[in-house]
Image (tube, helix red, strand yellow):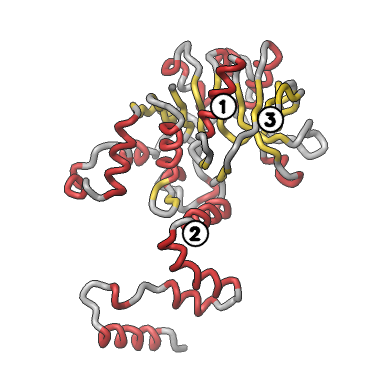
């Protein structure tokens, strides 16, 4: 299976952190977001991955490349895991010259995917599903031989943030799309089924993109191209088993970090007192709980640790 991962966005919601690094390289506990996405693609059966990047995103390529400087640490479990992931699929990169919308990014894959159907995963969304989400969509695709979009029900106050689809339910959790609307107002939304950012597409999508005019911001939206495709043939939307983590802004990124950290037994025990003190509005205690233990510092002694605490106390006086 070929999978396309659009990762060319500017990441303006994370500025200034993303001024010189891709938002897809922001850490989620101890791994960058893009590594989770690639791992999900591989777990779904991908053996060929194309990551669509943009100017200033060379770090994405470097992350999956061999590093001579770190070769002596190759037995470190985390690096070994990354190396094995990089070898389980051929990973390619192509640049989108200008960030002109999701459809424009996918169009960059035209000559890579050719006449084959292919999967799409967004570079800022993580899906924790079993089976993996793209595998669930591919199973639907094999049944209907038409594009399949992952959807979930979204609350009223989030409708305007999603592409929304509507159509008859052809089997439990599967809908034949008749209307697809990009970020409608609540009054204009034809349903509450929001597109979550995972797709199985067919080569016909490229002609639909070519025929789709840009929106008011000059961007070509994939939702609009899929609406055009649905008028000529079938497009399906499917709900899925699992949990999606959107990491599109600072709050969602921090929330996901907390959830993933809490799922680590080691980090959970260290976070527990910090979170407890924050919830009870004891920020000073939380800062103390979060401070690394002095005895864990290289070369420290109880006397040195005590002296360090006295220096910190003096610096904190008015």
Query: At 46% across and 27% down in the image, what residue appears?
Result: 4
Image quadrant in which the N terminus is located: top left
Residue 293 sits in quarter? bottom left
Tell me whether circle 1 and circle 3 mark residues in contact (CB < 8 Å): no
Point out residue 218 in the picture as x, y percentages from the top left corner: 61, 29
Residue 262, numbered label: 2
Q: Element under label 2?
A: helix
Point out residue 164 in the picture as x, y percentages from the top left corner: 71, 32
Separation of marks 1 and 3 at Cα, in angstroms = 12 Å
Q: In the picture shown, does residue 198 fall above or below 24?
A: above
Q: Residues within 10 Å of mark 1 (few under 14, many from 20)?
A: many
Point out residue 166 in the picture as x, y percentages from the top left corner: 75, 27
**Residue that mark 1 sits on:** 137
Q: Element under label 1?
A: helix
Query: At 60% across and 23% down in the image, what residue appears?
Result: 148
**Residue that mark 3 sits on:** 173
Separation of marks 2 and 1 at Cα, in angstroms = 29 Å
Q: Element under label 3?
A: loop
Q: Earlier in the sequence, mark 1 or mark 3?
A: 1
Q: Residues within 10 Å of mark 3 (few under 14, many from 20)?
A: few
Q: Residue furthest toward the right? A: 187
Q: In the picture shown, does residue 63 fall above or below 29?
A: above
Separation of marks 3 and 2 at Cα, in angstroms = 31 Å
Q: Earlier in the sequence, mark 3 or mark 2?
A: 3
Tell me whether circle 3 and circle 2 mark residues in contact (CB < 8 Å): no
């Amino acid at each position: 299976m070929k999978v396309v991962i659009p990762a060319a966005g500017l990441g303006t919601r994370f500025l200034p952190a993303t001024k010189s690094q891709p938002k897809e390289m922001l850490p989620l506990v101890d791994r960058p977001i893009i590594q989770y996405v690639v791992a999900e693609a591989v777990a779904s059966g991908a053996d060929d991955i194309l990551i669509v990047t943009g100017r200033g995103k060379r770090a994405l390529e470097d992350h999956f490349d061999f590093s001579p400087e770190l070769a002596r640490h190759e037995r470190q479990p985390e690096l070994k895991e990354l190396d094995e992931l990089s070898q389980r699929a051929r990973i390619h990169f192509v640049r989108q010259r200008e960030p002109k919308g999701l459809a424009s990014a996918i169009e960059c894959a035209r000559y890579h995917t050719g006449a084959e159907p292919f999967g799409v995963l967004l570079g800022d969304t993580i899906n924790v599903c079993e089976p993996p989400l793209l595998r669930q969509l591919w199973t639907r695709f094999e049944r209907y031989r038409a594009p399949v979009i992952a959807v979930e029900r979204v609350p009223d106050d989030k409708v305007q943030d999603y592409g929304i689809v509507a159509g008859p339910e052809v089997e439990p959790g599967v809908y034949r799309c008749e209307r697809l609307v990009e970020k409608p107002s609540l009054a204009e939304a034809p349903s509450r089924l929001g597109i979550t950012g995972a797709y199985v597409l067919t080569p016909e999508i490229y002609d639909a993109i070519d025929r789709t005019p840009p929106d008011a911001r000059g961007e070509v939206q994939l939702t609009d191209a899929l609406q055009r495709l649905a008028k000529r043939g079938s497009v399906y939307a499917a709900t899925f088993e699992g949990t999606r983590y959107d990491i599109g802004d600072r709050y969602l990124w921090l929330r996901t970090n907390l959830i993933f950290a809490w799922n680590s037994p080691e980090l959970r025990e260290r976070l527990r007192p910090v979170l407890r003190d924050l919830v009870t509005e004891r920020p000073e205690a939380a800062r103390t709980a979060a401070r690394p233990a002095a005895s864990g510092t290289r070369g420290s002694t109880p006397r040195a640790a005590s002296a360090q605490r006295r220096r910190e106390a003096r610096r904190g006086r008015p």
